[in-house]
């Protein structure tokens, strides 16, 4: 009997993108533009930062398990505290979902090329991980319905989806939901919902409040708090009660909670972030298409390009690095011929397009 189970042995440890300092050092550059991790190019919500500073006292005391932030979220969404969970990023909550609900014979079902964080968490539990292909880079909900078996326990849907940036509509979700047995838990990962919610086709999952759906959201993206690790989820109180049995009792940290509470008040930062993103997304969509790239229209803060093959991906990635621009190749997601580019500040987007244009016309450095 080996010490490490085969399903752990076969995993690849998460490889974060290169940091700005690493790229500067490796390529001898003074300026590096990082468009690799769907972070907010404006930085962090000022109100979140203010709240962190205010709460940076009494840190010798343990946190209260998230109750302060849960209370604020419950008020804001007109829910009971018992319907709300918070954790170390939405991935922290996802990890608890995996530990709480999956048994050895269960199956997880999602799309091919799903968000890498979910893939790793689900596979680390050693259960069967089933996927269906994308349909034109969208979740194929009818095909997912057909693949539900008596063993299916969790269906993972990200809306908007990372890495494609696409959404499924209210109509599509409602039709799909009717085909899912109540014993199956649907994770609706809405890490990017703020970017899509003004689209009338977008199904805000809070509208439904189904008993077997858990909504996950995060402060990492639009609120610019990825480094703080704070996310939240909404679900039926029975689901939350069981998740709380498994959650580390002292996550999230006192300062992470404070950041979340401050961020929720920061309407101005939210508005500014949305504005800069929609302008940047339009510019990138238009410019990348003009460069002849196959772009998938996005509803989030990033855009995916489908290239010819992995060699082309590696070539463009490396050439961009030399010019001080970091993007995300998607091999780890299972899409070796695709890249993902995060929307940056106006100037950063222009630097990327300019560099890409030179690379595609073979102006090498
Ligand atoms: C779809 C999706 N879900 C969840 C996350 C993780 O967010 P968090 O930082 O809250 O763990 C990400 C981050 O990239 C994401 O793209």
Image: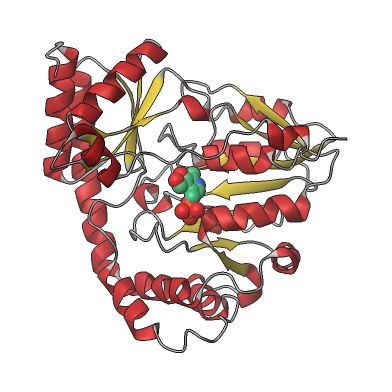
298 sits left or right of 95 in the view: left
Q: Give the x, y percent position of residue 59.
A: 47, 84
Judging depth in this view, the residue of 271 and 335 nearest the camera is 335
Q: Give the x, y percent position of residue 275.
A: 21, 52
Q: Identify the residue at horizontal 76%, vertical 39% (top origin).
A: 4
85 sits left or right of 278 in the view: right
Quadrant (top left, top right, bottom left, bottom right) of the C terminus: top left
221 sits left or right of 248 in the view: left
51 sits left or right of 106 in the view: left
Q: Give the x, y percent position of residue 303.
A: 33, 33
Q: Identify the residue at horizontal 60%, vertical 67% (top origin).
A: 85
Residue furthest right in the image = 1
Q: Give the x, y percent position of residue 3.
A: 80, 40
Q: Is residue 362 above or below residue 8?
A: above
Q: Is residue 30 visible?
A: yes
Judging depth in this view, the residue of 114 and 6 nearest the camera is 6
Residue furthest bottom in the image = 58
Judging depth in this view, the residue of 325 and 153 nearest the camera is 325
Q: On the image, which quarter does residue 199 sit in? A: top left
Q: Identify the residue at horizontal 34%, vertical 56% (top origin).
A: 222
Total count of labels: 0
Quadrant (top left, top right, bottom left, bottom right) of the N terminus: top right
Q: Identify the residue at horizontal 73%, vertical 64% (top origin).
A: 246
Q: On the image, which quarter does residue 211 sit in? A: bottom right
Q: Is residue 138 visible?
A: no
Colour scheme employed for the rendering of this structure: secondary structure
Q: On the image, which quarter does residue 247 sit in? A: bottom right
């Amino acid at each position: 009997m080996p010490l490490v189970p085969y399903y752990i042995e076969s995993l690849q440890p998460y490889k974060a993108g290169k940091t700005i300092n690493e790229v500067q050092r490796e390529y001898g550059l003074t300026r590096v533009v990082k468009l690799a991790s769907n972070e907010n190019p404006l930085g962090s919500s000022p109100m979140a930062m203010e709240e962190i500073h205010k709460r940076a006292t009494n840190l010798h005391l343990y946190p209260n398990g998230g109750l302060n932030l849960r209370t604020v979220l419950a008020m804001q969404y007109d829910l009971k505290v018992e319907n709300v969970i918070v954790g170390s990023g939405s991935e922290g909550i996802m990890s608890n979902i995996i530990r709480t609900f999956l048994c050895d014979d269960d199956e997880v079902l999602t799309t091919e090329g799903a968000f890498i964080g979910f893939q790793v968490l689900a596979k680390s539990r050693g259960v069967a991980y089933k996927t269906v292909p994308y349909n034109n880079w969208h979740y194929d909900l009818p095909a997912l319905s057909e693949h539900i078996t008596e063993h299916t326990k969790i269906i993972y849907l990200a809306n908007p989806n990372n890495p494609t940036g696409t959404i499924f509509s209210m109509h599509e979700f409602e039709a799909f939901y009717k085909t899912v047995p109540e014993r199956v838990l649907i994770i609706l990962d809405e890490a990017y919902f703020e970017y899509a919610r003004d689209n009338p086709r977008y199904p805000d999952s809070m509208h439904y409040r189904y008993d077997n759906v858990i909504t996950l959201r995060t402060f990492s993206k639009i609120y610019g708090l990825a480094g703080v690790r704070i996310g939240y989820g909404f679900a039926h109180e029975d689901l939350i009660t069981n998740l709380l049995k498994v959650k580390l009792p002292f996550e999230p940290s006192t300062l992470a909670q404070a950041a979340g509470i401050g961020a929720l008040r920061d309407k101005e930062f939210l508005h500014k972030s949305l504005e800069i993103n929609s302008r940047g997304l339009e510019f990138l969509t238009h410019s990348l298409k003009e460069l002849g790239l196959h772009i998938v229209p996005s509803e989030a803060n990033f855009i995916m390009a489908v290239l010819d093959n992995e060699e082309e991906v590696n070539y463009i990635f490396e050439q961009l690095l030399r010019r001080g621009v970091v993007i995300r190749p998607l091999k780890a997601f299972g899409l070796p011929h695709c890249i993902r580019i995060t929307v940056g500040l106006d100037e950063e987007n222009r630097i990327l397009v300019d560099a890409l244009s030179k690379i595609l016309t073979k102006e090498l450095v």
